[in-house]
Amino acid sequence: MTIDTAIRISEVSHSFGEEGEARHVRALLDTSFDIARGELLCLIGPSGCGKSTLLNIVGGLLAPTTGRVDVFGKQVAGPMPRDIAFVFQESALFPWNTVRENVDLAMRFQGVAKAERAARAARALTAVGLAEFADHFPGQLSGGMRQRAALARALSLQTDILLMDEPFGALDEQTRMILGEDLSVLLAQTRKTIVFVTHSLGEAVFLADRVAVFSARPGTIKKVIAVDEPHPRKPDFVTSQKFTSLRNELYALLHDEIRKTMSAERARPPTPGALS
Amino acid sequence: MSGGAKPVSRAAVIAVQIAVPVVLVALWYLATTRWGVSRILLPNPVAALQALIHVLATGAFLGDLRVTLFELAVAFAISATSGGIGGYFISRSTWRIRVFEPLLSAIYSVPLILFLPLYVLWFGLGPASKIALGASISFFPVVLNTVAGFGHVDRTLVTAARAMGASDVQLFRFVLLPAAFPVILAGMRLGFTVALLSIIGSEALASLAGLGHHIVELSENMEMPGMFAYIAFVVAIAAILNLVVSTLEARGRRP
């Protein structure tokens, strides 16, 4: 393993349920991949292709059926709060705590000394533009603001790796665009290693250094596309020829896989999700 | 306001709410003074009020009130503790939830006050049988709500806390408990109310002391004004206790 590899995924397969059971699902098949330090990798693919499953395996929330994942040379055997922070699709903020308390609690879970926490929380909230809303409860915020808060919580943990599972998936297109731009700016400053699961082709091209396209279930990485454009990305990148052609290339790759998924879904009953 | 009905003024609501008891007392008064209802069956409201004032002024209620409140406090302490701990234990496994939740719900729907003779046989006529019965009956709403509260915590929140490195103790203290707390609190309030009802009820049926006991005693001695005075007193005590518990519950909830 070279020094520049942050995450190494080696021949990872995952199944839900036991072999032979009616609800047995092979979610991931024999996936191998290296993610470089400081890289933003987007995972994109048809629903149920196992991209969220892979993210949870990388984060140590799920043990793979076979294969292994190494993070900075250590095999993943459970959550690694010092190295990896998560942002989930639903913000997963604690509704009974204010935004500030949420950020503080995350650091407390991680083991950050009390003296340090207030300053770090303030910095993270300022970075995502939520300083004025620190004492609001999540229920008092819009969906976009909640995801900013969740991002602030993850940033405050100062991990080298950030795993984001469709963090903007529940937001409207405009909010999503703005958050994407802000994220690109933030990332250019922090140079974290990020794995970002998304459904959105545009989001993938706009954010990623590389986009890994998944095949239909059982999922594996079908093709990797590099997006050679420096961070932070400008809003006019979206209207460039390069953006459009990359997006079209992704669309062509995905189109067949989505068709396959849909015909497979007609043939079999619905299956359990990746996690929860 | 529901179903597109005309908005009702708050003053009108309060006026009717006051008018109903006033009319009832007026009818009561007329029944005893004009319509010749026997004083043995129904005392004069003025006499009942005088009796109430006498009871309050002399502090004659203190002994019985102390017994009833003591029974209530012990019974509720037992059911809140055992229901809380038992409910948490059950909620930690889906298997145990599937086994025990329907079982406990089924037992809860049985009128357990029917077991009072058995409790008296085991624990005697004194406070012990009231405490045991009150604790048994109020155990069920507490344990069922505790199971419901802890058993349905959002999985994402638990996963998120684990990913951030929360220990078992931190997970309980900062995630499970606050998530379940409002539901548990509602169960405790319910448990408190049924404990009070069953204790006063069982005092009235078979006992040596307590408010329920005293009411029956007065009735057996044909001291109708005193009996009505005590009933009014118990109603007031129950209302105050419920108000206190509801206020505590409302305070315990956070946005």
Image (spheres, coloured by chain):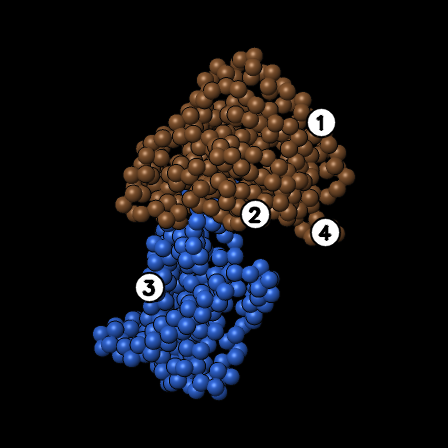
Chain colours: A brown, B blue
Q: Indicate whether A39 appears above or below A81.
A: above
Residue closest to the eye, A22 or A31: A31
Reading the chain from its start, which is encountered first: label 2 or label 4? 4
Say whether residue B31 is visible: no
Amino acid identity at mark 2: Leu
Amino acid identity at mark 1: Asp
Residue closest to the eye, A54 or A173: A54
Residue assigned mark 2: A62
Residue assigned mark 1: A256
- Chain letter of mark 4 equals A
Both on one chain, marks 1 and 2?
A: yes
Q: CA distance from mark 1 to mark 2?
A: 29 Å
Q: Is residue B88 left or right of residue B126?
A: right
Front position among marks 3 and 4? 4
Cβ–Cβ under 8 Å for marks 1 and 2: no
- Chain letter of mark 2 equals A
Residue closest to the eye, B101 or A38: A38
Residue assigned mark 3: B240
Callout count: 4
Judged from the image, the secondary structure of the residue bearing numbered disc 4 is loop
